Amino acid sequence: MLPTVAGILVDLAWWLDTRGDGTIAPPLAAAILEDIGADLQRLSPAQRARLIEALTALAGAEEHDGRRHQLLVFPAAMGLVETTPPGRTRC
């Protein structure tokens, strides 16, 4: 179940981060992303490790370049790790 929920969370964050068409007010999108990051930072180290493992596995199996990128940079973008994977930029 964790990989499914982790994938949905990344997709939601990606959608919120790329809404420039008026679908959602930018301040609301930013507030939701900040809340997601704050909630994830409260995970225990073991929970963080499991989430990152799930995201890495999903990225390894992902065929869509954009989604694979989002899966790989999500931990750094949400403050779960200190660095972004080599060759990647934060979303």
Image (cartoon, helix red, strand yellow):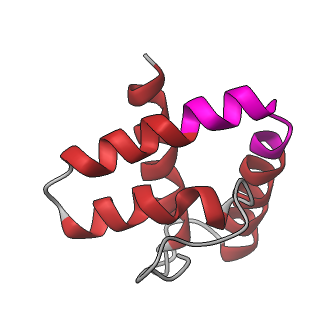
Task: Please name whichever residue, 79 or 10, is drawn nearer the observer in this view of the structure.
Answer: 79
- Residue 72 in percent (x, y) is at 44, 60
Is-magenta flag for residue 49?
Answer: yes
Q: Residue at 31% of width from left, 51% of height from top?
A: 59
Q: Is residue 80 above or below residue 58?
A: below
Q: Is residue 84 above or below residue 1?
A: below
Q: Is residue 60 left or right of residue 23?
A: left
Q: Looking at this rendering, what residue extends furthest in the left direction? A: 63
Residue 90, quarter of the rendered image: bottom right
59 up-or-down from 31: above or below:
above
**Quarter of the image holding residue 87?**
bottom left
- Exactly how many numbered labels are in the figure? 0
Q: Is residue 21 above or below residue 67?
A: below
| On-image quarter of the N terminus | top left
The image position of residue 37, as x and y in percent, is 75, 53
Q: Looking at the image, which residue is at 42% across and 63% down?
A: 70
Indicate the position of residue 75 as horizontal and vertical percent values: 60, 56
* Residue 58 among magenta residues: no
Identify the main secondary structure in magenta.
helix
Describe residue 84's horizontal placement relative to residue 68 as left or right: right
Range shown magenta = 39-51
Tell me what residue is drawn at x 49 percent, y 81 percent.
Answer: 20
Tell me the residue at 84%/49% (across/down). 38
Front-most of residues 28 and 2 = 2
Residue found at the far front of this picture? 86
